[in-house]
Image (cartoon, grey):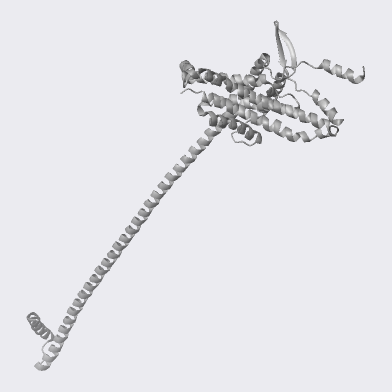
Amino acid sequence: MDLLSLVRAASEAAEQPTFSLVDINADTIIFTLINTGIIILIYFFFLHKPVCSILDKRAEAVKKDMDDAEKAREDAEAARTEYEQRLEQSKEEAGRILSDATKRAQQRGDEIIAGANAEAANIKQRAEESIEREKKRAVNEIKDEIADMVIAAASKVAEKEISAEDNERIISAELERIGKEN
Amino acid sequence: MQTLELLKNAAEFSVKGPLQSIKFSIGGLDVTISESIVVQWLVIIILAVVFFILGRNLKLKPTSRRQMAAEYIVGFFRNMVNDTMGVKYKKYTVYIGALFCMSLVSSLMGLLGLRAPTSDLSVVATWGVITFILTQRNKVKTGGVKGFFKGFIEPMPFMLPFNIIGEIANPVSQSLRHFANILAGSVVGGLVYFALGQVAGGLASIGVPAILSLYFDLFSSFIQAYIFCTLTMAYVSMAECD
């Protein structure tokens, strides 16, 4: 017996029995069922469940974000509308203030003009009064001068000294009469 | 001479079924745990670690690629179920997701040089049975017991045998497709490894099989997992009685 055949014999002895190539073995089926069940559990608990839960959570988060964004958009829209309204209001307000001011200025101007007119009328009246007074004074002065002239003329005419008091009295009476006739 | 040697070696190449890894008995009941189950335990550990890392410490604002990946995976199964079955079958998402991951990672075990559990008919048949049960359950649920039995004699009573065969054929074909694709992939892969090992003193087996592995292990694993899940969803949602 050579070495090679010895090794071959040893390896044949060590060779384990095998199933036939196409064979259905009940033990294998049962163990495969068990192993498949284990792998289903492993897949479910180690991978499927955590991933699905995170996917669901993410979907929720995305939905929430989208809702928030929608809400923010609506808020912005509302704020814009309000702002526009306020702008409109302030424009109106400004317009009103302006027209008020214009009106008031107009009024004030009218008042000033009216005041000025009144003043002018006043001044005019006073001037007229003053003129009237001056006229009267002038007339009186003329009267006095005429009296003096008349006296001088009369004294010359009379050639006779009449007492100044008598003269004065006669002429005054005469002038009074003339004045009344006037 | 060399060709003869190759052929002689090729005769020794054989594809065996899964190993009977552990044998014990409980209460006189003999239990044989196959290699497929042992590799499935590894799959469970891998998936538990991956899912745990992916699913922990998730934030409302995703900042890590880890979280992106986790959300992508869950979203992928969610969309798959919603598109194929409709929103009302939403709760199947967990089963489909788990089934897809288990099938994919099981098939990918071939990349590590282990025997892919999906190349064991018993494993895939289990999922076929689950599909069958879910399908029948959905029939009863939507049509009641009366609708369930009525479904078998539609459109004509003489269609009864065909309907029964059709019901059974669905999960059987689905299981066989998945199992056979992965097994064939591993057989072809094994053959290529063996053949390349025989030529050029075994140097050819470095690098060259990677291309085949890309198709048979990566692409096929993904496609078969996807097909199996899609078929499961289609069978279950089509079982709906009007």
The residue shown at (12%, 91%) is A153
Residue found at the far right of this picture:
A2
Evaluate whether residue B166 shows in this view. yes
Find residue A48 and report its horizontal and vertical position in percent: 60, 27
Evaluate whether residue B52 shows in this view. no
Find residue B119 and report its horizontal and vertical position in percent: 69, 23
Find residue B96 and report its horizontal and vertical position in percent: 59, 26
Find residue A59 and report its horizontal and vertical position in percent: 53, 34
The residue shown at (56%, 32%) is B79
The residue lying toward the viewer, choosing from A47 and B177, is B177
The residue lying toward the viewer, choosing from B115 and B54, is B115
The residue lying toward the viewer, choosing from B54 and B182, is B182
The vertical placement of A32 against A56, above or below, is above
The residue shown at (47%, 18%) is B157
Horizontal side, residue B76 vs residue A127: left or right: right
Image quarter where the C terminus of chain A lies is: bottom left
Quarter-of-image position of residue A164: bottom left
Image quarter where the N terminus of chain A lies is: top right
Q: How many marks?
A: 0
The vertical placement of B166 against B80, above or below, is above
Horizontal side, residue A66 vs residue B36: left or right: left
